[in-house]
Amino acid sequence: MSGTFLGMPAFPANAARAVQDSQLRHNLRKATHTIRAKRLSTIAEVPDWRELREAAKAVKDATLRDLDRHLLCLEEQVTATGGHVHWARDAAEACRIVAGLVRATGETEVVKVKSMATQEIGLNEALAEHGIEAYETDLAELIVQLGDDRPSHILVPAIHRNRAEIREIFLRSMPDAPPGLTDEPAALAEAARLHLRQRFLASKVAISGANFAVAETGTLVVLESEGNGRMCLTLPETLISVVGIEKIVPTWRDLEIFLQVLPRSSTGERMNPYTSTWTGATEGQTFHLVLLDNGRTDVLADEIGRQALRCIRCSACLNVCPVYERAGGHAYGSVYPGPIGAILTPQMRGMGSPLDASLPYASTLCGACYDACPVAIDIPEVLVHLRARAPHPPAERAAMGAAAWTFSRAVRLTRAQRLASRLRRLLPRRLPGPLSAWTDTRDLPEVPAESFRDWWSRTQGGPR
Amino acid sequence: MSARETILRRIRAAVADAPEVAVPRDYRTASGAGGLGGSAVQDLPGLFAERVDDYRATVLRAGPGEVAGVVAERAAARGVERLAVPPGLPEEWLAGLCDVRLLRDDPPLANDELDRAHGVITGCAVAVAETGTIVLDGGPGQGRRALTLLPDYHLCVVPAGHIVRGVPEAVALLDPRRPLTWISGPSATSDIELDRVEGVHGPRVLDVVIVGN
C-alpha cells in the first residue's frame, strides 16, 4: 500500500473490496462501538449540551460570515506578539513556504504533531523532496508511517489496525522496539515513548496544525492526549503551524464552548489529557503561522455547502456512520473519510474524478451524522445538494429527462400509465443496458391493471 | 496579487450574500446566566476529586498545615530522589522532604537534566471541577511548560479556592497572553482500538493534592 490516494477507483468499488476484509470489519466495529458508548455517556451528563451545540454552530457561522476581518485581526495579533504569518493559496504554495522555513534553519529533520491540514497538503512527501525528513509523533500517525500505510480516520488514523497488527508493525519497522514486545496497549505505548524520547530532545524544528486560532488575541490551541503535542510545541527552537483559514474563532471566550464540545464528541472524554494554548513567539521560540486556503474559499462560496467549514474535526460522524463502519476510511480516497469527508472532499477537490464524483453517494442518508455533529452540520442536506451537482451518466440523464417530460403534463402521465397497464405482462423484471445497475439491487414495482386515477374516475371512490 | 490579497478577495466574494448571525449563549456561563436554572454544585473540591480520580490519577486531601507532610509522603511513595521545582513555589510545601535532591529551575535546567528528574512539583492557576482539569499558566510555582512535561511524575498542589465549576469559569479567569497547559489526568492515548490507555510521552503518573475545603 502506498501513501497516496491519487488515481483510486470510485467509492463503490473500494467499498465492495473493503467489506470482504473480515479483519477490517471486526476492527472497525469494535472501535466505533467502543467510542459510541463513551460519547453518549459523557454527553448525557452535560445538561446544556443542546445549548452548547447551538452556540458552537452560531459562532462558526458568524466567523465564516466575517472571515476576512477575523483573519486580518489574527494576523495583526500574531505579528504583534512576535510571530510570523504566511498565506498559502493552495497545497503546493503551503509546502513551498514550510520547506523554505525549515531550510532556513539549516535542519534536515522535523518532528510533527498530528495535523489534518498537513496530511491534506501532502507535506511529508513535499518535505522529502527537499531532503527534509518529517517524523510523525502521534501514536496512530506513527503506526501509519511505520506501516507505509494510509490514514483511515480523522482522529485515530490507524483505527483499521488492531493491537496484534500494531505489534507486528513495530517489530518490523521500529529499530529500537523491545524484543519481547507484547500486544498490550500499555506496552505498545511504552515502545513509542522510548522510540521518540531522544528525537523530542534533539529536534530543533516542529510542525503542527491547530484546533483553533483565536482572532482577537492571536492565540493558537492544540488538543491532544499523549504529550507528543506538548513535546513538539515546547522543546524545539522553531515552531511552524499550518492552519486552515476556517479554524478561527473570533474571541477568547468562544473557547468556553469548543473546549466542552470537542473532547466529548471526539474521544468521549470529559476532557482530553492535554490542551496547549500559546500566543505568538513563546518562551523564546521562533513561531511561524501558515494560513491555508486550498479549496476552502470554494466551499465558502456555496450557500448550502459552506456549513461543512464549521467542522472541528471531532470525527463523531465517522464513528456513528453505518457506511463508514463497514467500508472503512480508505474507501473514501481522502484524508477526510466518513460523512464529513463525503461532503468536504468533493467540494475542496471538485468532482472531476470518478472517485470524487462518487463520494456524495457514499451514504444512506440515515442522518446519524447530523445528530452526532457538535456544530450541527446537516450532512444529508449537503450530500443531496452535491448529488444534484455531480456529473450523471447519459442513461440516467435520458431516463430522468423522459420522467420529467412525462410528469410535466397530466395527460402525458395518464397515457403513459394506460400504456404501461396494457403492457404489464410484457414488462421486464430488470431494466436493460446501463440501467440494469439500478435493478441489480432493487425490485421494479408491480404495474397495476388500472391506475388510481382511472379507478377513481370509473367508480368515484367506490361504495361509501 | 499576493496570496494574502487573493485569499481575502475570494472570501469577500464568497460570503457577500451570507446573512448576519447572532450567537445565542443559553448554556451555563461563568456569570451564572443561561436558561438552566443554575443547579449550583455545593461541593466543588469533592466533585473535582471524583473527576480527577476517574482519569486514574491519585487524589489526596490536606488541611492548610498538612501540605508538607503529604508532599513528603507522596515523594517517598513514588520513589522520587530528584524533584524539579519551579520558581515561586511556596517553600513550606517542601519542608517535609528529606533525601530528595531539589532541582531548582532558576536558572532554567537543561532539557536532559530535566529529563533525568524523577518528578516535578507545582501549584496551578485554576482547576475545573466538572472535567477534573488543572490549568497551569506559567505563573509563580508553575514554571515553564517543559518543566511539567519531561519528568515522568507530576505532583500538583491545588488550593481548594482555585477550583471553579466548569470550563466557562476557567476561560474567564485565564489570561490568553500566557502560555497555558490544561492537564486532565496522566498522559494517555486512545489510538489502539479507541480505548484509553494511560501513559505515553507526558508524565505517566499524576498525583493531585487538594488543600483546604
Image: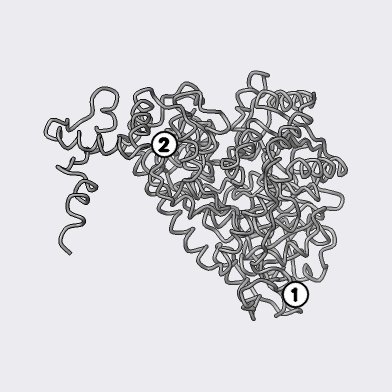
Res A178 visible: no
Dot 1 crowding, Cα within 10 Å, few <14, some 14–19, many 20+: some
Vertically, is A90 above or below A454?
Answer: above
Kind of residue at disc 1:
Gly
Q: Quadrant of residue B156?
A: bottom right
Q: Secondary structure at mark 1?
A: helix
Vertically, is A427 above or below B198?
Answer: above
Tell me where residue A232 appears, x and y as whole percent: 69, 41
The colour scheme of the drawn protein is: one colour
Kind of residue at disc 2:
Tyr
Question: What residue is drawn where x is 75% and y is 75%?
Answer: B161
Could you tell me which chain the residue with mark 1 belongs to? B
Return the residue at label 2: A361
Q: Quadrant of residue B121?
A: bottom right
Q: Quadrant of residue A129?
A: top right
Mark seen at residue A146 = none
Report the front residue among B115 and A170: A170
Q: Secondary structure at mark 2?
A: helix
| Callouts 2 and 1 in the same chain | no
Return the residue at label 1: B161
